[in-house]
Image (tube, rainbow, N blue to C red):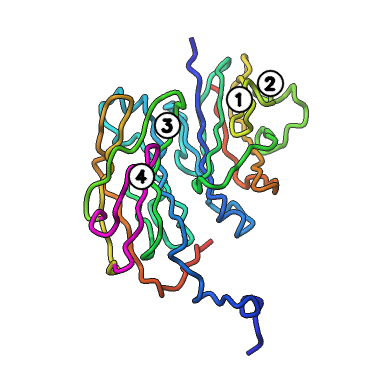
Amino acid sequence: MGESDLDRMGQRPQEVDLSSIFVYVTSIMDVMEALVKGTVDDSVYIYDNHVVKGSTGLGTQTLNTVVNPGNRLIWSVYGMEVETLTQINSISGQVNDICDIKDMGSYLAGTIKADTIPGTYEYTVEYQLESQLMTLSTTQTLIVESAQSPVQGVQS
Amino acid sequence: MIPQLNIITMINSVAILSDSTFNNYLYMVDNSRGQRTCGQGTDSLCTQVVGGQVLNWHLNPINIQMAVEFGDFRWYKDGILITNPDDEPVEKSKLYGSPTTTYWAAIVKSGIKGQYEYQFQVNLLGKMLWMTSFPRIYVA
């Protein structure tokens, strides 16, 4: 077998350090609509940057984010009306067993523990909208794959 | 008073650069809440607007460490590129009111109705890319 460009670079795919990857989970919130209704349900769209790894549910309220042990997760929220104040107040659920989440002010961050057992871990998000706290009724999940899992491509 | 309308675009800039295609890595939402609004969260958003309304486009990267900017905008009617600015559905098809190019605003012209498609460029680390989908506005 001939030597590939990656071989010549000394970095075969299986040698890529997956734990060095940041994973961003970003919500877009219709703050005004949520404040009027009194709930964030149906007023938030959640995305991550791991669709190429197999994440599903992008743009919905049930995001399933594929991650690996060691990944650094960043949770943040944008308000559709940029003048409004919105931020993620807390994250609760199973994900706290595998990730020590810290409030960094404008976002929450945490690293998937290296010894995390592959599996699906649920969590719920509590948002702050101006002076109100609202919890999204649907759950999100982190799907933890082992560090040796092959990269999944997006089917076009 | 007609409320201003915000159109938020999130992009996965790393994936776009990696694949050299937008390929469903671009997501749009708005706060129009109109009856003809559809495609929320996709790259083919349809936004209901009215004449005289100010539209504000905002561009945000999902990968917050990567800066992204708007490039040019272009408009279509029934799939045909509009080359005469007088035929465009918006006034001030240029940066309006803000020094940052992650924000682009325009005013819907009065007296027009119907659907107009548009595309914008995204500047990713100096690489200018036209989006491949055709979001649209519907002027009621």
Q: Nearer the viewer, mark 4 or mark 3?
A: 4
Q: Secondary structure at mark 3?
A: strand
**Could you tell whether B28 is left or right of A65 in the image?**
right
Q: Which residue is mark 2?
A: B92
Q: Position of residue B100 (x, y in %)?
A: 62, 30
- Residue A21 lies, in percent from the top left, at 47, 60
- Name the N-terminal-most of marks 1 and 2: 2
**Is B17 on the left-hand or right-hand side of A41?**
right
In which chain is the residue bearing label 4? A
Side of B102 where B28 appears, left or right: left
Span shown in magenta: A95-115
Question: Residue placed farthest to the bottom in the image?
Answer: A1
Looking at the picture, tell me which residue is in the foreground, B111 or A86: A86
Which mark identifies residue A84?
Answer: none
Q: Residue at x 38, y 27 (%)?
A: A85
Which residue in the structure is indicated by mark 4?
A: A108
Q: Given the image, on which type of amino acid does mark 4 rest? A: Leu
What is the three-letter code of the residue carrying label 2? Lys
For the residue pair A3 and B104, the one nearer the viewer reads as A3
Q: CA distance from mark 4 to mark 2?
A: 39 Å
Quadrant (top left/top right/bottom left/bottom right) for the N terminus of chain A: bottom right
Name which of mark 4 and mark 3 comes first in the sequence: 3
